[in-house]
Structures are given as structure tokens and as C-alpha cells.
Image (tube, rainbow, N blue to C red):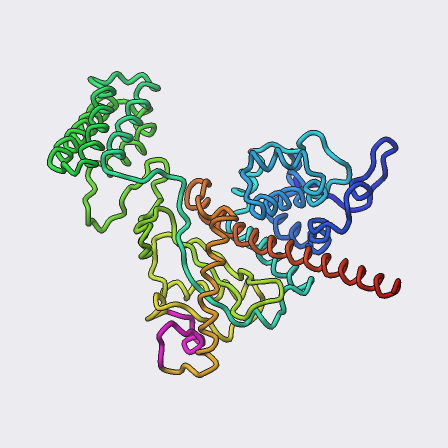
Amino acid sequence: MKPQEQRGGGQGDLFQARLDQIISLQHALVKLAGKIDWPFLEQSFGAVYTDARGRPPLPTRLMAGLEILKYSYNLSDERLCEVWLENPYFQHFCGEAFFRHELPFDRSSMTRWRQRMGEERLKALLQESLAAAAKTGALKPSELTAAVVDTTVQPKNVTFPTDAKLLNRARERLARLAQKHDVALRQAYTRVGKLALIKHQRYAHAKQFKRAGKVLRKLKTYLGRTIRDIARKIARNKLLKPVFAKALSLSHRVLTQQRRQKAPKVYSLHAPEVECIGKGKAHKPYEFGVKVSLATTLSPSAGGQFILHAKALPGNPYDGHTLESIIPDIEATTGATLSRILADAGYKGHKTPSGYKFKVYTQAQKRGVTDEIKRQFRRRAAIEPVIGHTKSEHRMERNYLAHRAGDAANAIPAAAGYNFRRLLRWLSFLLLAWLRGLVAQKSVSLA
């Protein structure tokens, strides 16, 4: 079934006061809720539903509003549920007419909603953030024709991987799975495996690498014995083979992977899609997650620097080769044709769609760079603090969503949350300017 959407107005309640009679209608969240085109979001997200029989889904405004609030205020799903029950402005933003003392949804409803929408439909949140910015005067449509592009790393919620930790964890997972399905192992190496891990960490810390290497080979022996033992026990059991297939495959990859192999490595057993990416940072030489491309406006807008595009790029592609897919996505999101794109030196030797070859300028480029473009290059570094704020304040610093779909489903709402947060500050600034003007007008009349 399709969701029963919430509509404004509605019949009053004799024993309850409506939220719009309790809260301040000048609050930035109330103003923002009035600027968002909720029917557009209902149309974009409602395409996944059918008219078949079944339980009706939750209203689109409720779920989309929760997603906006989550990434605008950097809240986890659990914390958002707690704050939503206490904050009447959050409830009004999500379309509630009266104050609710109980949650009309379950915490896991947000997870299932994100999975159902997917990457393509979540782009509607980013589109609506830009449309609302244009409505409020925080962003001019002419500022969408020039962009700055850069990439960053969206780290996954994984521990720092070492060979010893991966080997021991793979053995523990296999032993736990064998115990769950009553597969009797010859030896589980529970006590000696943990002791070997502790020894390896101590030897490595003391720079006794010969002893550490000896203990690491012992951990490999424990894991190899466990893999072969389980393989023998389930060889003739057709029911257990698919149960152990993924765990055995990952464990074998951990056991056999080499330092400079070309095939993808395993850096986390619960998130095998994680990649090792080096961005040249002195304090963080390697990060473990997925590469994300961000694009912002080139010229400074009245409401600040807005994000025009965000996309997860699995496989750690070369920055210059990403423009072939990113440029059409930016134009589809903004609805404007790009006339100029500025990028850092990492995009040198870029691949662009036909017609855009002479519209992309990289750092230290000499040919075709006019004085105007040289002045605009001073604005290229403005994307760096935008990336920093998006990571530290809008949940891109550590991604808790699972699989590659979770990487994409976290990057886009994080960018939209950054834009909506800029809009809230812009609306608060407009309210403050209006109040100052009102006070100045009254003081003049009294004088």
C-alpha cells in the first residue's frame, strides 16, 4: 500500500492544543518546514510503493523529516527517537498536528526506510535543500553554474586493522559459528589464540619484530587448522555448506592475503567492502572506508557555501576519472548547466564527458587559464572547511551503515544535512535582522 500522507489543517481537538498554538512560529525549524516542498518529496519517495494490499507505510513527511533532522543535528537513530519525544519543534517539522507522548514509529523503521529508498531516491533530499535555499534567498540560481570538486574519505565504523587482529578474529568467528551449529572442532584455540595476540601486540610495541613475526605465524597456523577442520566436518553435509561458505571464504582471504597483492584485501570481517585509502595526511596516513566526491558552489552565497553533489565512489578510483560520471550527476541534481569546474592537482589528466574538456581547470594548470580564473582559484580551497564540517558535524566522520549501499546512503543525507543546517542559520539570521530593524524603528518613533 501507499503511505497515508499527512496534510495541513485538520480538525481541532477539544482537549488538546495544536502544536502551532504552542510553539513559536518564528522559530527557524518552523520557517524551514514551510519552505520545503513536501509534495515533491512525497512524489519522489512514493515511487517505491504500490497499491497492493498490506500494512500502509509511515507518512513520507515523517520519515523524510526524521532523516533531515538526524543529519542536520548529528544524531544517532536512538538519540533522535529520544529528542523527538521531547522536542515539539521536531514533531511539528515532521508534520504532527498535536504533541505526541509516544513514538509513532520504531527505531528500526528508519533503517528499513533508508534501505528501501536507496541512493537514487535519497538525492531528492539534496535537491530539495538547494531548492529551499533558492526560495529563502540564501542561494542564487546563477551560482549553480560554477562548482568546486574534491574527494575525501568516509571512514567506516571498523577498528584499525592489523594482521594479528584479523587472523584471531577470523578464528573466533569460525569457532563461534561451529559451536552454534554443533560442529565439534578438534581444537578451538580459544585460550592460546588470545595469548598469542597479546604477545604479538607487546612484541610489536617493543619493536621486537622477529619475535612478533614468529607469533604471527603461530596465529596463521591456528586459523589454517580451524579452516581445514571445519571443511572436513561439513564436506558431506549439504545443509551446513552454505552456512559456512561466506565465513570460510573471508577467513581464507585473510589467511592468504599478501602485502602488495593486486586483488582487494580484507580489512574488516564484518565490513569486507572497506578499502584502504591514503590521502597524504601526516596525522592519518591511511583511512579505511570509501572515497566520496563532493561538489560545492564556487562563488560565496549569501547563506554560505552549499554542497551541490555528493556520491560514494567504491573501488578507490583516480580522482580525474570520476568526473565522467560526476558532472552529469551535478547537472541532474541542480538543474543547471555547468560552465566552469575547478579542482585540485589530483584531477590532472581527467576524463570528462564530451563538451566539458575545456571547462575543467586544475591547480597549477597554465594553458587556458585567464586572470579571472586565477582569481577564482583562490576560492578553490573553500571546499576544504566544508568537507571538515560535513565530516565532524553531519555524520560523515564515521559511517555506521552497513555494506556499500550504506556508504551511499550516508554520504548523500550528510550533504543534505549540511545544507539544511546552513538554511537554519540563515533563517535565524533573517529573524535577528528583522527584530533589530523593528527595535530601531520603535526607538526612532519614541525619540
Residue 437 location, quadrant: bottom right
| Magenta-colored span | 351-366
In the orientation shown, which residue stands out farthest toward the front? 447
- Relative to 121, is 351 above or below? below
> Which quarter of the rendered picture does the C terminus lie within?
bottom right
How far from the left and from the top, in percent, is residue 436? 75, 60
Residue 357: percent from left, percent from top: 41, 76
**Percent from the top left, x then y, of residue 141?**
62, 69
Instruction: Identify the residue at image location x=63%, y=48%.
Output: 46
Q: Which residue is painted at 37% across and 39% down in the image?
A: 158
Image quadrant for the N terminus? top right
- Secondary structure mostly seen in the magenta stretch: loop
In the image, taking residue 125 as reference, residue 383 lies left or right, namely: left
State the residue at coordinates (77%, 49%): 25
The answer to whether residue 235 shows anywhere in this view is no
Q: Position of residue 302 (x, y in %)?
A: 62, 66
Q: How many marks?
A: 0
Q: Is residue 17 magenta?
A: no
Q: Is residue 286 above or below residue 269?
A: below
Whether residue 369 is visible: yes
Residue 362 painted magenta: yes
Q: Is residue 413 left or right of residue 157?
A: right
Closer to the camera in the image, 200 or 36: 200
